[in-house]
Image (spheres, rainbow, N blue to C red):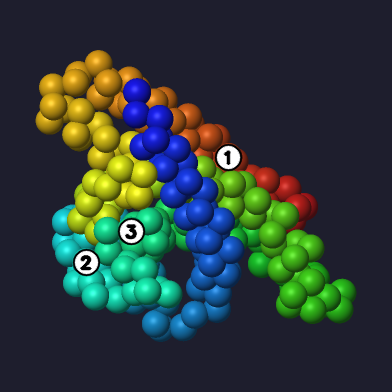
Amino acid sequence: MDIEALLLSLKLAIWTLVLILPFGVWVAHSLQNMGKSRSWIEASLALPLVLPPTVLGYYLLVGLGGKTILGIPLVFSFTGILIASLIVNLPFAIQPIQRAFEAINPEIREAAQVSGLSKWQIFRLIELPLAWRGITSAAVLTFAHTLGEFGVILMVGGAIPGETKTVSIAIYDKVQSFDTSGAGMLSLILLCTSLVAIALSYGLFGRSPSHANRWSR
């Protein structure tokens, strides 16, 4: 089993989660107050769900090509695949949180405003606790999706061992070299991870609306 590729995928998933989750909470909360432009913003954020990975990877490759951070090239580097991972995971990090915020009864916010709480206090003391299931669901989905991402990562990072060769790319390489046992073991790990992630997501997010409604009684 390719431990190096597995550890690299875990590193990528953790960094992606740490960077994208606060952004996802902010965007999901801000979308509630958007006007006519909301549908266009939501459509733009959901594009990674419908765009072929090669198309998204191509535009990222063109956009990042030739650019550096502190002299380090973005393409074919861990930084490059991290940027790609952040972009491709936007819908997974935003949509569950957005649905959780929308499930909160508006009367709860109105009562908090009447009580004299500021917008920040309402967000921190009321909305975040009520939306925690959606936030957890977003975190689980983002983490699992990052572990299994293939097309965009391959386009932007290639398959450099220890730098950009994630577990999904390692599976592809093992199949190409007819190492079916190694590919099968790595595939089983991703399969189990994805199954657990989906089960947790359905279990947590599915009960979020009723959880929020209990607070309105």
**In the depicted view, which residue is nearer to us: 60 or 131?**
60
- Answer few, some or many: residues within 10 Å of disc 1's Cα (few below 14, many 20 plus, some between 14 and 19): some
Which is more foreground, mark 2 or mark 3? 3
Please state if 63 lies on the left or on the right of 10 as rendered: left
Real-space Cα separation, disc 3 to disc 1, in angstroms:
35 Å
First-in-chain label (2 vs 3): 2
Which is more foreground, mark 2 or mark 1? 2
- Answer few, some or many: residues within 10 Å of disc 3's Cα (few below 14, many 20 plus, some between 14 and 19): some
- Residue 54 picture location, percent across and down: 16, 56
Please state if 179 lies on the left or on the right of 140 as rendered: left
Disc 3 and disc 1 in contact, CB within 8 angstroms: no
Q: Name the residue under label 3.
A: 77
Residue shown at the point (53%, 35%) measured from the top left = 200
Residue found at the far top of this picture: 181
Q: Which amino acid does label 1 sit on?
A: Leu
| Res. 96 in view | no
Which quadrant holds residue 122?
bottom right
Q: Which amino acid does label 2 sit on?
A: Leu
Q: Which amino acid does label 3 sit on?
A: Ser
Q: Mark 2 points at which residue?
A: 61
First-in-chain label (2 vs 1): 2
Residue shown at the point (51%, 54%) measured from the top left = 15
> Which mark identifies residue 204?
1
Please state if 75 lies on the left or on the right of 214 as rendered: left
Residue shown at the point (79%, 79%) measured from the top left = 118
